[in-house]
Amino acid sequence: MGSLDGMLLDARAAQRALARTEPGRRTRAIASMAAHLDAARSDVLAANALDLAAATDLSTALRDRLTLTPARFDGLVAAVREVAAMPDPLGEERPLGVRPNGLVVSRRRIPLGVVAVVFEARPNVGAESAAIAVRSGNAVVLRGGSEARRSNAAVVGALRAGLSAAGEDPNAVVLVDDPDRARVAELLQAVGRVDLAIPRGGPSLMAFVDAHARVPVIRHGAGICHVYVDAAADVTMASDIAFNAKVQRPGVCNAMETLLVHRAVAASLLPALGRRLEAAGVELRADAAAAGILDGVAHRAAEPADWSTEFLGLVLAVRVVDSLDQALAHIARYGTEHSAAIVTGDVSAADRFVREVDASCVLVNASTRFNDGGELGLGAEIGISTSRMHAFGPMSARELTAEKFVVRGTGQVRGSA
């Protein structure tokens, strides 16, 4: 690769050209990216197989994130095509009214600029981030983990070929393939050349970002996600939601890590749900009250660290609480503002949970697995923001834009104060 500074300058030039194009051109560019990615299927899957063969020391969760099956590849291509079909956010104007002096004030959507995405393991991140960036008139600089180096190169190579075939500058999508983490520090400190950094990874990456970042950062942080089963819950519904939230894909950030159960329904829920989870291979870590109810179900005593751990696997912390207040206090202390769900038939309890829980997505009678851009109707996502900035929750094309003020006058000048 060339110098990082040169890559960032090329990305800035490509972004400015892309932002000036008509929405239809960006649509055609993304469609071309999807077509070239689909045509590179065998190359991408072969590269992924080589990465998997070399990744002998990955955790189960990271290995799952790294793996591209044919079905996941189909989903990846479909996600890029969905971005091509999205409404284009650029140029959208929001009227704010007419001032007493006749000035007409509005706000107009513009790109953020050059966005750096630093991620681990998941090769789909590069494709989805690139498509969303092009849709919103941004350039994206991708720096994936060394465990997915071949996969990322194959994916990004196809995307850049698609941009070129559509007549656009391929430097709107660039890959930093140097595995040295010093390149990450350079990206995080590239003030004036990188407008936003989005890290997606584990605690060590986030600690590195906190230590080195000088550009604005939106965190895709840990997902210590909670499901609270209220006293007024339908027990069958609660069992299905909790099982899905933990087991459907345990190695992802919106999987449940802690189950809170109101004492009033614990005896009717936990034994059957515990057996169901045990049969699925889930290790239960229970507080004293839950342990007393999980009679005959394998479990171990929960330790203090379990409440603040993102397991990313088939491990679940379980606690019995005496009230909604206690559940809310637990989530406030241990949650990471990612996802939290309540299962209840009590409208007032649901409303209070929605009002008081600080999370990027709060769900009522639904699995935490739905905190996902595609599931929420946004199409692909560039990450799930756990930073309470202009974006909070899944980030798609609109979340990669800002609004500038536009003022239209007829010759007005401002008088003295």
Image (cartoon, rainbow, N blue to C red):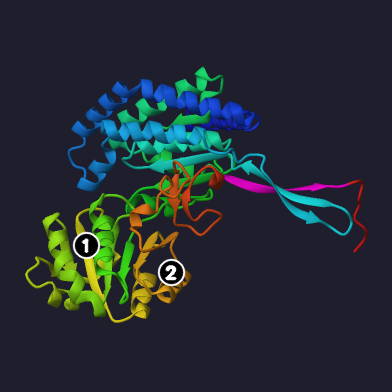
Disc 2 marks which residue?
357
Q: What residue type is labelled 2?
A: Val
Disc 1 marks which residue?
316
Residue 101 among those drawn in magenta = no
Using residue 393 as the reference point, say whether residue 101 is left or right of it.
Answer: right
The answer to whether residue 357 is above or below residue 369 is: below
Q: Where is residue 12 in the image (x, y as percent from the top left)?
A: 58, 32
**Residue at x 56% of width, y 23% of height:** 168
Q: Distance between the residues labelled 1 and 2?
A: 21 Å
**Residue at x 32% of width, y 64% of height:** 226
Using residue 393 as the reference point, say whether residue 144 is left or right of it.
Answer: left
Q: How many residues crowd around disc 2 within 10 Å: few (fewer than 14), some, or many (20 or more)? A: many
- Dot 2: element: loop
Which is more toward the observer, 372 or 200? Answer: 372
Using residue 92 as the reference point, say whether residue 277 is left or right of it.
Answer: left
Q: What stretch is highlighted in magenta?
A: 401-409
Q: Please say if the residues under marks 1 and 2 sit with CB atoms less than 8 Å apart.
A: no
Which is more toward the observer, 322 or 11? Answer: 322
